[in-house]
Image: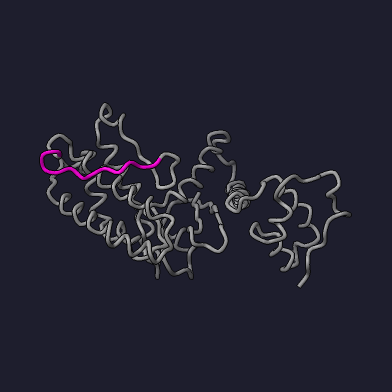
Amino acid sequence: MLVYTTGNDALTAIVLYDYQPSRKGSCAQNFLDGFNGLVQCDGYQGYNRLEDVTLVCCLAHARRKFFEAVPAARRKKLKLLDINSDVAIEDSNLPDEEEAEQLIPAEIGLLYCNKLFYLERTLKDLDSGERKQQRTVLEQPIWEQFWNWLDTLHPTGGSKLGKAVNYAQNHHDTLMNYLLDGRCEISNNRAERKAKSYAIGRKAFLFHTSEAGAGASAVMYSIVETAKANNLNIFQYLYTVLLYMPDYMNSSAGIEQLMPWSDFIKEQCSGLIDVESNVPENRIPLTQA
C-alpha cells in the first residue's frame, strides 16, 4: 500500500492510498507520471526510477539507523523526536574532541541528526523563503561537519554502525535536497503518519482477500484520511457524500462541491449534524455551474 500526501504548502490537503501487487519502482513511476517537482520519500531504491523530479530523502530514516546502532542499555535515555512532537527537541551542542571520547560513534551521529531536527523546529513558523535562508546559515555548517566526521569512520562491514554510515553516504545528496526549497521538510514523517493509520487497521483485519478488496480499502482510506487532513468530522462527511452522490455523481460541479476542501463541505461537516431531518427531500441543493 503506497501512500502519497501533499506537503505543508498545499492549497488543499490530499492523502491518497494506492494498492499495488508489488513494490516495484514502476508502481510509483506510473502513479506520478506527468508530475515534476520535489518528491519527499524514504531511501527506497525504486524511487530512483521517477523522472523529472528531485528526490528529497528523509533524515528520520537515516537517524534511526544510528539509533539502532546504539546498544540497548544506552538507547533507553535517547528519544527520536520530530519537529511536530508535543515535547520539544532539546538543543544539544555537538561534542568537542574530549567529549567525543566519552561517546560511541552511533551516539555522535544521533547528536548531529537531533541538532538538525532541533533547528528545524525553530524554523517551522517562518515562511518558505526565510526558512530556506536560515537553513543555509544554521544547518549547512552542521551538515558539513557531519560529512567530515562521517569520513573518519571505518566501521566493520555488516555492523549496525556500518549500515548507518553506508545509508547516509549512499543518500548524501538527497538527504540535503530539502535545503533547495523552504517548502520541503527535513523528513517524510507527514506521509509516515498516514501510513501508520493503515498499519494499525491491518493489525485488526490482517489481510485483504482479493486485490479488488485492497483497492477498495485504498479508496476508503484516501477519503477518510483526506477528510481528516481537512479537519472535517468524518462521520458527517461520509453521511453528506452518501446523501448527495446518488443525484450528483455525474455532475462535475456537484463532485467539486463534495470534495473535502469545498466551502459547502466545510459548512456542512463541522459541528453537529441532525441525521433525522437531514434527509434527501430536505437537503440543500448543490449549486450547478
Q: Is residue 10 visible?
A: yes
Residue 19 or residue 128, whichever sits in front: 128
Q: Which residues are magenta?
A: 88-99
Q: Residue at x 27, y 61 (%)?
A: 137
Q: Position of residue 243 (x, y in %)?
A: 79, 53
Instruction: State which quarter of the image contains the C terminus.
Output: bottom right
Q: Is residue 194 magenta?
A: no
- Which of the 4 quarters of the picture holds residue 162? top left
Left or right: residue 277 versus residue 109 is right
Q: Residue at x 36, y 42 (%)?
A: 89
Q: Position of residue 144 (x, y in %)?
A: 20, 57
Q: Position of residue 99 (x, y in %)?
A: 14, 38
Q: Residue at x 69, y 65 (%)?
A: 256
Chief SS of the magenta region: loop
Residue 249 or residue 181, whichever sits in front: 181
Residue 115 or residue 211, whichever sits in front: 115
Left or right: residue 87 versus residue 77 is right
Q: Residue at x 39, y 45 (%)?
A: 82
From the viewer's perspective, is residue 99 above or below residue 32? above
How many numbered discs? 0
Q: Position of residue 139 (x, y in %)?
A: 28, 56
Left or right: residue 219 versus residue 5 is right
